[in-house]
Amino acid sequence: MPLFRKDKREPEAASGDAQVLAQLRSAGVDLKAPLEIRHYLYFKQEGDARRLALEFGDSPEWQVEVRRAAQGPEWLFLLTHRAVIDLAVIQGIRKSLTEMASRTGGEYDGWEAGVPS
């Protein structure tokens, strides 16, 4: 399953989100169908990531995984869900997760969408 990713290093989050959606469309992805979306948040302390995970509880809609980051000393908070996305939806989720990460000592690093094969 190819992935298209938007990460925080792009100058404008909104234009980056729009760019990823355009890439998905040009790859023939039906944006009216639910896609698997992954959001990446990073924390310096494992406990901070786990406290945020508690806010999602046992929701069947949101899967949370907390593990060591692939590089460096940080902790990855990986949030996965299926959704029909458009620019307004993804920007709303980005805003909420950015605020949640900031409030709990973390940083929102972006999202990616899995493309059905």
Image (cartoon, rainbow, N blue to C red):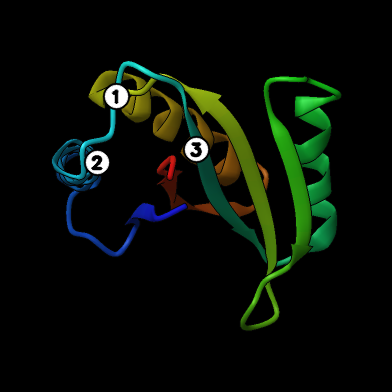
Comes first in the chain, label 3 or label 2: 2
Q: Which residue is mark 3?
A: 37
Element marked by disc 2: helix
The quarter of the displayed image where residue 28 is located: top left
Front residue of 97 and 1: 1
Image location (x, y in percent) of residue 93:
44, 27
Disc ID at residue 31: 1
Q: Is residue 76 left or right of residue 6?
A: right
Question: What is the three-letter code of the residue carrying label 2?
Answer: Leu
What distance separates the C-alpha of mark 3 from that of mark 2?
12 Å
Image location (x, y in percent) of residue 50:
83, 47
| Residue at the farthest front position | 117
The quarter of the displayed image where residue 94 is located: top left
Given contact means CB atoms under 8 Å apart, are the residues at marks 3 and 1 in contact?
A: no
Q: Is residue 16 left or right of residue 63?
A: left
Q: Which residue does the image show at 78% across and 54% down from the upper left? A: 66
Assign the C terminus to one quadrant of the image. Answer: top left
